[in-house]
Image (cartoon, rainbow, N blue to C red):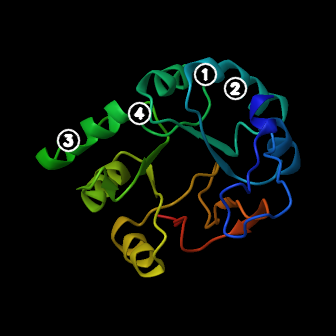
Amino acid sequence: DEVRTLDAGARGPVPGTKRLQIPSLEEVLDRFRETPLVIEVKELAAVDATERLVRKFGMHERVLIGSSSTAVTERFYRTGLRTCASSRDASLLIMLSLTGVTPVKPRYDVLSVTPNYFGLPIPVRLMANTARKAGIATQVWTVNDPEKARALWQISQAQIFRHGEIRAERQFLVDHRNLQWLRRDDLSFVRRI
């Protein structure tokens, strides 16, 4: 409820615009029931409520859960929902990739990585190739430059998941100026491998 009091457009490019209310997760899941979504959960306290809502709307096949918190991700591993690799598992994948070892079927469904972490380059291609050998999809995130996005698409053969088959989809993102859901080719990479 606290987040509902905030103005999503407060730091937008046009000062003085109409107040924009942030939708609740329940409202987003209700409105976009057929849309594949990636949900980042920041706090351990939000795990149970997030799981409950995903199941309430029957979205367990279309939702991918991620978190920068290993504790949150580890908790989601136990729910049976589709998850991104925890920070710990992604770090382990780097080491396995560097040594040429393919992991046995990991607990996660998707490797979700950024090309740079606090200024340090991440070996996306190497990790994506190792993940692919283990049957794991890769999603590269937070790339705003279309040329870089295309280059990452080519080197990582990144994709987004779908139960049964993996199909080219575009991730829906929120445009914080007007809270409309947009398809953005330059921000999400999806590809069948």
Q: How far separated are the C-alphas under marks 2 and 1?
A: 8 Å
Say which label, 2 or 1, has the lower sequence index. Answer: 2
Q: Amino acid at mark 2?
A: Glu
Say which element carries label 2. helix
Q: Nearer the viewer, residue 31 or 132?
A: 31
* Residue 178 left/right relative to 38: right
* Residue 89 left/right relative to 184: left
Residue placed under numbered mark 3 in the picture: 96
Q: Amino acid at mark 3?
A: Leu
Residue pictured at 41% horizontal, 27% vertical: 70
Q: Which part of the image, by quadrant, shows the N terminus?
A: top right
Q: Nearer the viewer, residue 172 or 94?
A: 172
- Badge 1: few (under 14), some or many (20 or more) residues near its Cα, within 10 Å? few
Q: Amino acid at mark 1?
A: Thr
Q: How far separated are the C-alphas under marks 3 and 2?
A: 31 Å
Say which label, 1 or 3, has the lower sequence index. Answer: 1
Residue 170 in sight in this render: yes
Q: Are marks 3 and 2 in contact (CB under 8 Å)?
A: no
- Badge 4: few (under 14), some or many (20 or more) residues near its Cα, within 10 Å? many
The residue mark sitting in front, 4 or 1, is 4
Residue placed under numbered mark 1 in the picture: 79
The residue mark sitting in front, 3 or 2, is 2
Say which label, 4 or 1, has the lower sequence index. Answer: 1
Residue placed under numbered mark 4 in the picture: 86
Q: Quadrant of residue 57?
A: top right
